[in-house]
C-alpha cells in the first residue's frame, strides 16, 4: 500500500485521542494510564497516532513540507502499536500503526531519514546486522555448543539468534541457554552461524522496505536450502518479522518464540525443574511478541459499504488488535518454575508499555528511549518484584542501559535464564 | 499570518522552546476537520478549523497567566483546550494561539472525607475515576467518555452524561476554581478565594459559577481554567475495576451490589412513566439510553459484535438474520440501560424490588438477553468507565446527533417516532447508515437527579465520502425544518453555527446577531455581552461565548 491509500483513514480518524492511553477500561491509576510513549514524552498532538494521521494528511495535501520537526514526528516513535490497540477498542476500520509505518516508508522513499538510521542501514547492507559489527563474527556466540551449522548441514529446526544475541556479550548467555535447552531436549536444531543475517524487521520499522525485503529473502532462501521446518528465536523483534512480515514471501515455516517452545516442553513433561528459585518477578510483554505477535492471516480484498455507510471488507479482513498475541506462554513458564512469584504490572499484555528500544528510537533518540525504559522500570519496581523478566534482547538491553546510573537496580532477566537456573 | 519574532520569543520564553511550535505540520495536528462533528456542526466536507499561529503547552498557572498577558499586550486571540474532543476547542480565526493544556495533568488532591478532587485540565475521567475508586469514591464522567477532561466539562461546558441521575451534570459538580481571566488576572473562587480550601464553589468567597456557566459554558472563549475541585460520589465497588476478557470485549466481574439492566417498555408512555417513577424512587446510579446509538434495527447485533472479540462489522449482516437477535432487537425497541448500585446488601435488594415494582406498574421488563453474565459484565464496565464512547463513530467514522434537546421524558417520546420516521426516509437515500430511523440516545435524568432527559438522534456517515457528508448535512437541514414546524428549538447540529460557519471560521457578527436575537431568551446573550465587555476587554475569546448587542 502507499500512503495515499490511507487517506480515507486519515479523514475517518475520530480525533478522540484514545491512542494516547491504554484502553480506558484498563486504566488502574493516574500514574500508569498512558499508553503511547511518543506523545507522553513529546506532548504535542502530532506525536500521537491521531496527530500523525493529521500530519500525513497535511503532507499529502501539500499544506506542509518536510522539516526537522516533521522528521522528528515521524521517527520519534517506537511503532510499538499501543495506539493501534487503543484505537481498535472502538474502531474497526482504522489501522493507525500501518499508517505510521507507511508514512515512514514514504519519507525514506523521499530521502528523509535520521542520520543514525542511515548508519544502521549502511551496516545492514554491508555486514548484515544493525549493530555496526563485522559479519564474520556473527556465529561466535555459539562456540562450544556443538550446534549444527546449517550453512553446511541440514536440520529440522533453526535457532535464529538475531543481531543482539549474536553480538552483545552481556546477552549472549541467553542465546546459549535457549539453544542449549533445545539441543538438550533432543531436537534436531542448528544455526546459520556466520551466514545468519539480520531479520530485517528493524529496517522495516524504520521505513526501509527494500532492505527488509532483501534480508527476508536471504533468510528464507537459506532456511529452505537447509531443510528447515521450524524457526525458533529468543528475540521478539525477529519473531515478529518471521511470524507477521515474512509470510508475504511465501514463508511457510512454523515460527516459535523460545517461550512458546519452553512452554510446550514443560507442558509435555520433557523439561522438568529440580531447583527452587525464591524470587518475586514481574513480566514485561515485548511489543513484538505480545500485541504485534499475532499470527499472520493473509488477506487481499477491498472495502465495501453495507447499510449505506457501514465500512466493511470483502472478503472479511483479519483484525490485528493485540487480542491474540503471545501472553500466556511466558506467564505459564514463569508460574511453573518452583519458587517464582509472578507480580503483574498495571500495564500488561496487549496494553503493555513499550521498553523504548523499537522502531529505530534507540539508535536515533537515545534520551527518549531511556526515558521510556525508565518509565517501565518505575512501574516494575512498584510491584515489589526483585526482577523484571522479559523475552526479548532489545528490551533487556534497553532496561539495563536505562539503569546504568541508577543506584537501585532491578534485576533484568530473560525467561530462558530463569528456566536454566531451575533445571 | 505568522507571529512576529518578538511575540514568538516572548511566548517561547514563558513555556520554553520545547513547548511551543509554529511548524505547519504540528499546527495541522491542531486543526479539526468539519466532517468530524462531535459537538456539533455541519458536517462540511473538506473544511477544517483554521490553523493557530502557534501551539503552546503551558506547565503551570503562572505560565498561563504570562501567556494571557502577552496576548493582551499584542492583541492575540487565545484558545485553550484540554482533551480536544470537539471543534469548540480549536481556533476559529486568524491571529489565534492554541493552548494545549495537557502538561497540566495532575490530580492535586483527593479529599476523601469531604468527597472532592482537585484537578488540572489534562486529567481525564478514566484516571480520576481510577484514583477515586481506590478511596471508595467515583466521579461523574461526561457523555463524551472517560478520555475527556472533567475540568473542561465542569468549568467550560455542561458535561451531561449517563451518570447524571446520580452525580449531576459536570457544571453542577464544580467547587473551588482557579481561573486565569482574559485580562490575565487570576481569580480564585468560592472557598478557595477566601483561602479556606476547595470545598465550596460559591462561598465563603467570590462566586462566579453562574457567570462562567452562562448559557452553556464558556467553551474555551473566556480565559483559561487552570485548576478546579469537582465533587466525588460514593463508589460501592472494589478499589480497582476487575477487568477480564479479551480486547475489545472487556468485561468487569463486579460484586452483586452493582447490577446493569436493559429495561424495555410496551409503549413510549410507559417508557416515560418508567423514568418518572425511577426518579421518584430515587434509585439508579447510571441511567442512559446508550446502545440505541447503533440504531433501533442494529443494536442487538452490534452488542453481539462488541462483546465478542472474534467478531467484526463484517459479521453484522449475518447476525441481523439470526432469529434470536431479531427477537431481542425487537424486544429492545423502547429501551434504556440502568445500573443499580447498592450501598449495602439491603439497599441493592430494595432498589431491585423498587425497580421490579416500577416495571410491573408500567408494563416494562428487564431484557433477559442483556442480563446474561457475559453481556451483563460487558455492559456494566462500559457504563461505569464509559471507555468505549468512540463507538459513536464505529460505522463509517462520522456521526452527529440531530434533535439535540433536553426536557421531560414526554418531550422526547412525543417526537421519537416521527423523528425516527423522518430519518428512516433519509436513510433510504444512502448518505447515512440505515439503522432503523430511531437512533435516539441520551441520559435518563440530570440536573440534580431527575426530571429531564437528553435526546440526540444519531446519524452515522462516512467523513471521507463527499456524497455521504453532504447528504448528512442535507438530512440535518430537514431535521431543522421538522423542528421549526413542530415548535422545537434547532437541534445541536445547528446551534453551533452561531459560533462557527461552514468554512470553519467564526460566524460573521451580523449573522450571529440575527440568530441570537431570534432565540427564545435573547436577554441571556445580551447579559453575556456585558460580562465579556468587562472580563475580556481585548476580545481574546471567540464567538463560542455567545453575545448579543442591545437592540438599536
Image (cartoon, coloured by chain):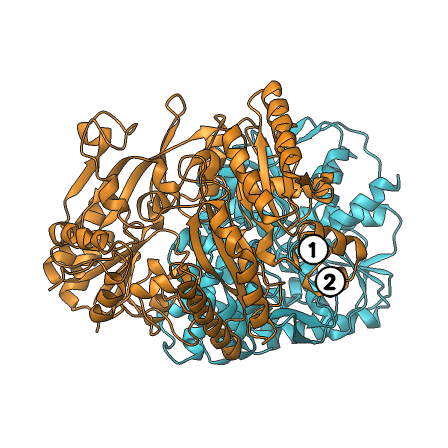
- When the figure is inspected, residue B129 is found, relative to residue A367, above or below; the finding is above
Q: Is residue A124 visible?
A: yes
Report how far apart the C-alphas of labels 1 and 2 lie in the structure: 7 Å
Q: Quadrant of the N terminus of chain B?
A: bottom left
Task: Tell me how many marks there are.
Answer: 2
Q: Position of residue B85 (x, y in %)?
A: 42, 56
Dot 1, crowdedness within 10 Å: few (<14), some or many (≥20)? Answer: some
Query: What is the number of the mark on residue B305?
Result: 1
Q: Position of residue B459 (x, y in %)?
A: 53, 64
Picture quarter containing residue A160? bottom right
Q: Give A261 or B270, whichever is nearer the viewer.
A: B270
State which chain is coloured cyan: A
Please tell me which residue is depicted at 42% across the width and 49% down the height of the picture: B406
Q: Quadrant of the C terminus of chain B?
A: bottom left
Please tell me which residue is depicted at 51% across the width and 35% down the height of the picture: A409
Q: Give B353 or A348, whichever is nearer the viewer.
A: B353
State which chain is coloured orange: B
Whether the residues at callouts 1 and 2 have beta carbons within 8 Å, the answer is yes
Tell which subunit mark 1 falls on.
B
Mark 2, residue position: B315
Q: Give B509 or A3, whichever is nearer the viewer.
A: B509
Q: Position of residue B224 (x, y in %)?
A: 25, 49
Q: Position of residue B310 (x, y in %)?
A: 73, 55
Asked which secondary structure carries label 1, the reply is: helix
B234 left or right of B329? left
Whichever of labels 1 and 2 marks the residue nearer the N terminus, that label is 1
Amino acid at each position: 500500500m502507499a500512503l495515499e491509500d490511507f487517506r480515507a483513514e486519515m479523514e475517518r480518524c475520530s480525533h478522540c485521542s484514545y491512542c494516547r492511553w491504554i484502553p480506558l477500561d484498563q486504566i488502574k491509576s493516574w500514574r500508569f494510564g498512558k499508553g503511547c510513549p511518543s506523545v507522553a514524552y513529546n506532548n504535542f498532538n502530532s506525536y500521537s497516532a491521531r496527530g500523525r494521521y493529521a500530519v500525513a494528511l497535511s503532507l499529502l495535501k501539500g499544506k506542509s513540507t518536510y522539516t526537522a520537526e516533521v522528521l522528528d514526528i515521524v521517527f520519534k516513535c517506537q511503532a510499538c502499536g499501543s495506539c493501534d490497540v487503543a484505537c481498535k477498542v472502538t474502531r474497526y476500520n482504522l489501522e493507525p500503526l500501518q499508517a505510521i509505518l507507511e508514512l515512514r516508508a514514504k519519507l525514506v522513499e523521499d530521502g528523509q531519514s535520521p542520520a543514525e538510521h542511515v548508519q544502521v542501514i549502511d551496516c545492514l547492507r554491508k555486514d548484515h546486522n544493525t549493530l555496526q559489527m563485522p559479519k564474520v563474527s556473527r556465529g561466535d556466540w555459539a562456540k562450544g555448543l556443538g550446534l549444527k551449522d546449517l550453512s553446511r548441514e541440514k536440520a529440522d529446526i533453526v535457532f535464529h539468534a538475531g543481531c543482539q544475541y549474536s553480538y552483545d556479550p552481556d546477552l549472549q548467555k541467553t542465546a546459549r541457554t535457549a539453544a542449549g535447552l533445545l539441543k538438550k531436549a533432543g531436537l534436531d536444531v542448528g544455526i546459520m552461524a556466520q551466514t545468519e543475517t539480520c531479520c530485517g524487521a528493524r529496517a522495516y520499522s524504520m521505513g526501509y522496505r527494500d532492505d527488509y525485503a532483501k534480508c527476508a529473502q536471504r533468510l528464507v532462501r537459506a532456511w529452505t536450502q537447509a531443510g528447515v521446518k521450524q524457526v525458533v528465536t529468543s528475540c521478539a523483534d525477529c519473531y515478529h518479522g518471521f511470524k507477521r512480515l515474512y509470510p508475504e514471501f511465501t514463508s511457510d515455516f512454523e515460527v516459535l518464540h523460545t517461550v512458546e517452545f519452553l512452554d510446550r516442553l514443560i507442558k509435555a513433561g520433557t523439561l522438568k525443574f529440580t531447583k527452587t528459585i525464591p524470587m518475586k518477578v514481574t513480566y514485561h510483554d515485548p511489543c513484538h511478541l505480545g500485541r504485534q505477535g499475532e499470527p499472520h492471516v493473509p488477506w487481499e480484498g477491498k472495502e465495501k459499504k453495507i447499510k449505506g455507510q457501514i465500512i466493511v471488507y470483502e472478503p472479511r479482513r483479519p483484525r490485528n488488535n493485540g487480542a491474540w498475541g503471545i501472553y500466556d506462554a511466558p506467564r505459564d513458564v514463569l508460574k511453573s518454575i518452583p519458587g517464582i512469584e509472578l507480580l503483574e504490572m498495571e500495564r500488561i499484555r496487549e496494553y503493555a508499555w513499550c521498553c523504548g528500544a523499537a522502531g529505530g528510537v534507540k539508535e536515533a533518540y537515545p534520551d527518549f528511549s531511556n526515558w521510556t525504559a525508565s518509565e517501565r522500570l518505575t512501574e516494575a519496581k512498584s510491584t515489589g518484584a526483585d526482577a523484571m523478566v522479559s523475552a526479548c534482547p532489545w528490551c533487556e538491553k534497553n532496561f539495563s542501559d536505562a539503569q546504568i546510573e541508577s543506584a537501585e537496580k532491578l534485576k533484568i532477566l530473560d525467561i530462558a535464564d530463569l528456566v536454566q537456573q531451575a533445571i | 499570518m505568522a507571529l512576529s519574532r518578538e511575540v514568538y520569543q516572548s511566548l517561547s520564553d514563558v513555556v520554553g522552546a520545547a513547548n511551543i511550535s509554529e511548524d505547519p505540520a504540528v499546527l495541522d495536528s491542531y486543526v479539526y476537520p468539519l466532517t468530524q462533528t462531535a459537538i456539533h456542526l455541519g458536517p462540511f466536507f473538506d473544511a477544517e478549523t483554521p490553523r493557530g499561529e502557534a501551539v503552546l503547552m503551558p506547565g503551570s498557572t503562572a505560565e498561563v497567566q504570562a501567556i494571557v498577558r502577552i496576548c493582551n499586550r499584542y492583541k492575540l486571540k487565545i484558545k485553550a483546550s484540554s482533551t480536544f474532543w470537539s471543534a469548540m476547542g480549536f481556533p476559529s480565526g486568524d491571529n489565534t494561539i492554541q493552548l494545549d493544556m495537557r502538561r497540566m495533568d495532575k490530580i492535586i488532591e483527593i479529599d476523601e472525607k469531604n468527597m472532592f478532587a482537585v484537578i488540572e485540565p489534562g486529567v481525564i475521567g478514566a484516571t480520576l475515576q481510577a484514583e477515586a475508586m481506590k478511596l471508595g469514591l467515583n466521579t461523574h464522567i461526561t457523555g463524551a467518555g472517560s478520555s475527556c477532561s472533567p475540568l473542561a466539562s465542569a468549568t467550560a461546558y455542561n458535561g451531561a452524561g449517563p451518570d447524571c441521575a446520580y452525580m449531576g451534570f459536570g457544571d453542577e459538580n464544580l467547587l473551588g476554581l482557579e481561573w486565569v481571566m482574559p485580562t490575565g488576572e487570576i481569580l480564585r473562587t468560592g472557598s478557595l478565594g477566601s483561602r479556606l480550601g476547595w470545598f465550596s464553589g460559591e462561598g465563603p468567597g467570590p462566586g462566579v459559577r453562574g457567570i462562567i456557566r452562562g448559557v452553556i459554558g464558556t467553551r474555551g472563549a473566556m480565559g483559561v481554567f487552570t485548576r478546579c475541585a469537582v465533587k466525588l460520589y460514593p463508589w460501592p465497588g472494589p478499589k480497582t475495576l476487575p477487568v477480564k476478557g479479551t480486547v475489545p470485549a472487556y468485561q468487569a466481574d463486579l460484586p452483586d451490589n452493582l447490577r446493569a439492566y436493559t429495561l424495555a417498555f410496551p409503549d413510549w408512555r410507559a417508557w416515560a412513566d418508567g423514568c418518572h417513577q425511577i426518579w421518584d424512587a430515587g434509585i439508579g446510579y447510571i441511567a442512559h439510553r446508550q446502545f440505541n446509538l447503533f440504531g433501533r434495527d442494529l443494536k442487538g447485533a452490534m452488542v453481539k459484535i462488541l462483546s465478542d472479540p472474534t467478531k467484526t462489522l463484517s459479521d453484522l449482516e449475518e447476525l441481523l438474520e439470526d432469529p434470536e437477535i431479531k427477537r431481542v432487537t425487537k424486544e429492545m425497541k423502547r429501551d434504556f440501560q440502568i445500573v443499580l448500585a447498592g450501598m449495602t446488601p439491603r439497599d441493592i435488594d430494595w432498589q431491585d424490588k423498587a425497580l421490579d415494582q416500577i416495571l410491573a406498574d408500567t408494563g416494562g421488563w428487564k431484557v433477559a438477553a442483556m442480563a446474561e453474565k457475559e453481556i451483563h459484565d460487558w455492559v456494566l464496565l462500559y457504563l461505569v468507565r464509559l471507555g468505549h464512547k468512540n463507538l459513536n463513530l464505529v460505522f463509517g467514522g462520522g456521526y452527529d446527533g440531530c434533535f439535540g434537546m433536553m426536557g421531560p421524558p414526554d418531550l422526547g417520546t412525543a417526537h421519537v417516532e416521527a423523528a425516527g420516521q423522518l430519518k428512516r426516509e433519509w436513510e433510504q437515500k444512502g448518505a447515512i447508515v440505515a439503522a432503523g430511523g430511531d437512533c435516539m440516545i441520551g441520559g435518563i435524568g440530570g440536573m440534580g437527579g431527575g426530571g429531564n432527559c437528553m435526546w440526540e438522534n444519531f446519524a452515522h456517515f462516512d467523513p471521507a465520502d463527499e456524497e455521504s457528508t453532504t447528504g448528512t448535512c442535507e438530512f440535518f437541514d430537514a431535521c431543522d425544518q421538522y423542528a421549526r414546524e413542530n415548535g422545537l428549538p434547532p437541534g445541536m447540529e445547528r446551534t453551533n453555527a452561531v459560533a462557527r460557519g461552514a468554512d470553519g471560521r467564526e460566524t460573521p457578527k451580523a449573522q450571529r446577531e440575527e440568530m441570537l436575537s431570534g432565540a427564545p431568551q435573547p436577554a441571556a446573550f445580551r447579559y453575556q455581552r456585558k460580562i465579556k465587555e468587562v472580563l475580556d476587554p481585548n476580545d481574546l475569546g471567540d464567538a463560542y461565548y455567545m453575545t448579543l448587542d442591545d437592540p438599536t
